[in-house]
């Protein structure tokens, strides 16, 4: 059976061009970038080239990019770095209730260390209201962190507007742009952010590498202590092949983004329309328009997301319920609950996230298979029986 991958928000396959760019840095050009002889300098040069590419993609200066082990580390670095680096100014942080666990769990950790965190609500589409951000600010607020686009239901937040408020109030602003970078245009100056998290494996780069953009002048303490790598902001020998791969992935994203976003938006809309038409008692989660080009998230009443997933898997189709990190947990998604969905609706959610190698034919196949799966599951569903 031909397998069909519709879970690109969980991770993307590494682009063959990216693998090709990385390979020499495992073997011929294996030097430690901190070594002064030519092997080392060759590796250092490759890192600096990648840094320029990543900086270019988001309108930053190359010295404002710090490579990390991924999006989670970038989020931890931003939040803990600003919190512990600005304790003398205040102890209040504002974030949203729909952030990725990398932000939410870091905030909970900071609360245990004496910081106070406001988790802003969202509306039925998952949007944070800039007015709520403004109202939540106190004279103790040192940081605002709101994600650029949701990994679960794809809603894109009004980051530019929030950035304007943060700037007016003189408060540091971080955005987790892991799902946005490489897929939609992202410019740190238009957004008005001080800090921005990225991850290579969400844009056809390798896993285990990411970056934090740190605007010049932003005060934060280093996350990793040790050597003097990354201008003393992140110790540890650099993941040279990973960073080179990240740079190549970014370069490809820049070339292909416009056309690809248009193609995916078309496929996305086709899938949303088809699912809502063919399966009754189904709703779209997230904003109908202000959403990532590749995200489809629906709640199907009277069935469990896990049961749909397993049945789709039997047909060779890979999708997800909520984020991959929490798909092994039985807790309903905190994101869908924050948007006002009931536990049952959240449990009946299904996320398809499309990517480079998906075709119209594949969308057609999902639209053929899923209504049959839902009909089969509903025929056995105690939830439907109690509804009737
Ligand atoms: N933030 C968001 C929005 C994500 O979607 C993810 C990954 O799922 C992360 C952070 C974590 O990134 P990484 O897997 O590179 O640690």
Image: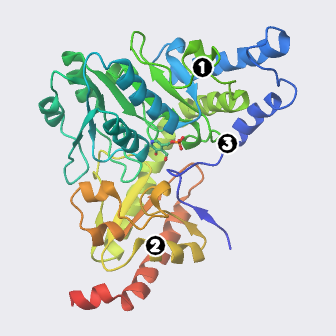
Q: Which one is in front in this view, the residue at disc 1 or the one at disc 3?
A: 1
Question: The residue tagged with tag 1: helix, strand or loop?
Answer: helix
Relative to 287, is 249 above or below? above
Q: Earlier in the sequence, mark 3 or mark 2?
A: 3
Determine whether 323 is above or below 234 in the image.
Answer: below
- The residue that label 3 is drawn on is 15
Residue picked out by circle 1:
51
Question: Of the residues tagged 3 and 2, which is closer to the observer?
Answer: 2
In-front residue for pair 333/80: 80
Q: Is mark 2 within 8 Å of ligand 1?
A: no
Q: Nearer the viewer, residue 372 or 118?
A: 118
**For the residue carrying disc 2, how many other residues have a C-alpha within 10 Å: few (<14), some (14-19), or many (20+)?**
some
> Splitting the image into 4 quarters, where does residue 326 fall?
bottom left
**In which quarter of the view is residue 78 placed?**
top left
Q: Position of residue 121 (x, y in %)?
A: 20, 46
* Residue 111 visible here: yes
Q: Which callout, 2 or 1, points to the residue nearer the camera?
A: 2
Location of the N terminus (image quadrant): bottom right
Q: Residues within 10 Å of mark 1 (few under 14, many from 20)?
A: many
Q: Which badge, 2 or 1, is on the more N-terminal residue?
A: 1
Does 109 sit left or right of 17 as displayed? left
Locate residue 201, reporting x and y percent: 59, 42
Task: Give the Cα distance between marks 3 and 2.
Answer: 29 Å
Return the residue at label 2: 306
The Cα–Cα distance between marks 1 and 3, rounded to whole angstroms, is 19 Å
Asked whether the viewer can see residue 187, the reply is no
Question: Which residue is drawn at the image coordinates 39% and 44% (left, top)?
Answer: 105
Specify whether 312 is left or right of 194: right
Residue 371 locus on image (x, y percent): 42, 79
């Amino acid at each position: 059976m031909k397998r069909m991958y519709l879970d690109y928000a969980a991770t993307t396959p590494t682009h063959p061009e990216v693998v090709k760019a990385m390979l020499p840095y495992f073997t011929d050009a294996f030097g430690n970038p901190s070594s002064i002889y030519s092997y080392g300098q060759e590796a250092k040069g490759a890192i600096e080239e990648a840094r320029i590419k990543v900086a270019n993609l988001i309108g930053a200066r190359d010295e404002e990019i710090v490579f990390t082990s991924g999006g989670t580390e970038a989020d931890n670095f931003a939040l803990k770095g600003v919190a512990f680096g600005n304790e003398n100014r205040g102890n209040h942080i504002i974030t949203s209730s729909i952030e990725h666990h990398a932000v939410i769990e870091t905030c909970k950790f900071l609360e245990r260390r004496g910081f106070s965190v406001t988790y802003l609500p969202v509306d039925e589409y998952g949007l944070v209201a800039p007015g709520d951000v403004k109202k939540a600010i106190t004279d103790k607020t040192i940081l605002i962190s709101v994600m650029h686009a949701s990994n679960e239901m794809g809603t894109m937040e009004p980051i530019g507007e929030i950035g304007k408020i943060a700037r007016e109030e003189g408060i540091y602003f971080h955005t987790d742009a892991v799902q946005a970078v490489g897929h939609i245009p992202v410019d740190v100056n238009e957004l008005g952010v001080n800090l921005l998290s990225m991850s290579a494996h969400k844009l056809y780069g390798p896993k285990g590498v990411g970056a934090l953009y740190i605007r010049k002048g932003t005060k934060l303490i280093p996350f990793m202590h040790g050597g003097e790598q990354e201008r003393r902001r992140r110790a540890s020998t650099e993941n040279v092949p990973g960073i080179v791969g990240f740079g190549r992935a970014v370069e490809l994203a820049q070339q292909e983004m416009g056309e690809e976003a248009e193609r995916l938006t078309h496929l996305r809309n086709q899938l949303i329309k088809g699912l809502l038409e063919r399966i009754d008692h189904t709703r779209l989660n997230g904003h109908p328009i202000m959403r990532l080009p590749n995200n489809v998230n629906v709640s199907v009443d009277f069935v469990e997301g896990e049961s749909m997933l397993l049945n789709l898997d039997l047909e060779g189709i890979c999708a997800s319920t909520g984020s991959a990190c929490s798909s092994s947990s039985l807790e309903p998604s905190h994101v869908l609950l924050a948007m006002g969905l009931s536990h049952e609706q959240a449990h009946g959610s299904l996320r398809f996230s499309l990517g480079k190698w998906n075709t119209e034919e594949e969308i057609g196949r999902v639209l053929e298979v899923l209504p049959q799966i839902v009909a089969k599951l509903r025929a056995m569903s105690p939830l439907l029986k109690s509804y009737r």
